[in-house]
Amino acid sequence: MINPLKISEMLSKAGEMQEQVQRKLGETVVEGSSGGGAVTATMNGKKELLRLHIDPSAVTSLSAGEADVEMLEDLIVGAVNEAGRKADEAIKSSMQGLLGGLKIPGLSD
């Protein structure tokens, strides 16, 4: 028979773990870049974009040409996507550490 007090305790611990994970994700910071560092995106573990740095040389080299603007847009997308992949890796690593090696679909290889 299941002890209701144990369920309550388990739910309380699960809530504490969730708070821990959210705090850790907010503190985790990753960077992704593209174009040899021309564009750098900084993101936290919650996948919130914190900063986007565009090297001034990437902007000054732009002419009025549409292709140049598209290239800069592609560099931005690439940097943000790389930061997102790194955030995913950090999230996965954090979750595996907190869960102590439990095999949970989507989190284990």
Image (cartoon, rainbow, N blue to C red):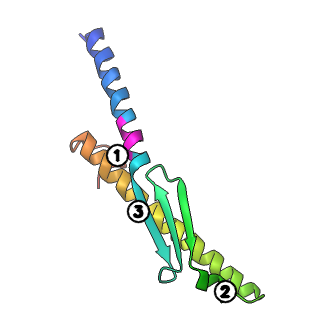
In the rendered picture of this protein, how many numbered marks are placed on residues? 3
User: Relative to residue 60, is residue 87 drawn left or right?
Assistant: left
- Upstream in the sequence, badge 3 or badge 1? 3
Single out the mark in the foreground, 2 or 1: 2
Secondary structure type for disc 3: helix
Q: Amino acid at mark 3?
A: Lys
Which numbered circle lies on residue 105? 1
Which numbered circle lies on residue 86? 3
Near-viewer residue (41 or 93): 41
Quadrant of the rendered structure where residue 4 is?
top left
Secondary structure type for disc 2: helix
Quadrant of the rendered structure where residue 62 is?
bottom right
Quadrant of the rendered structure where residue 59 is?
bottom right
Q: Residue at x 26, y 15 (%)?
A: 6
Task: Count neighbours of disc 2 (C-alpha within 10 A) and say few if under 14, some if 14 to 19, many if 20 or more.
Answer: few
Residue 15 in percent (x, y) is at 37, 27
Q: Which residue is mark 2?
A: 60
Single out the mark in the foreground, 3 or 1: 3
Secondary structure type for disc 1: loop
Real-space Cα distance between discs 2 and 1? 47 Å
Q: Please provide the residue range marked out in magenta.
A: 20-24
The quadrant of the picture occupied by the C terminus is bottom left
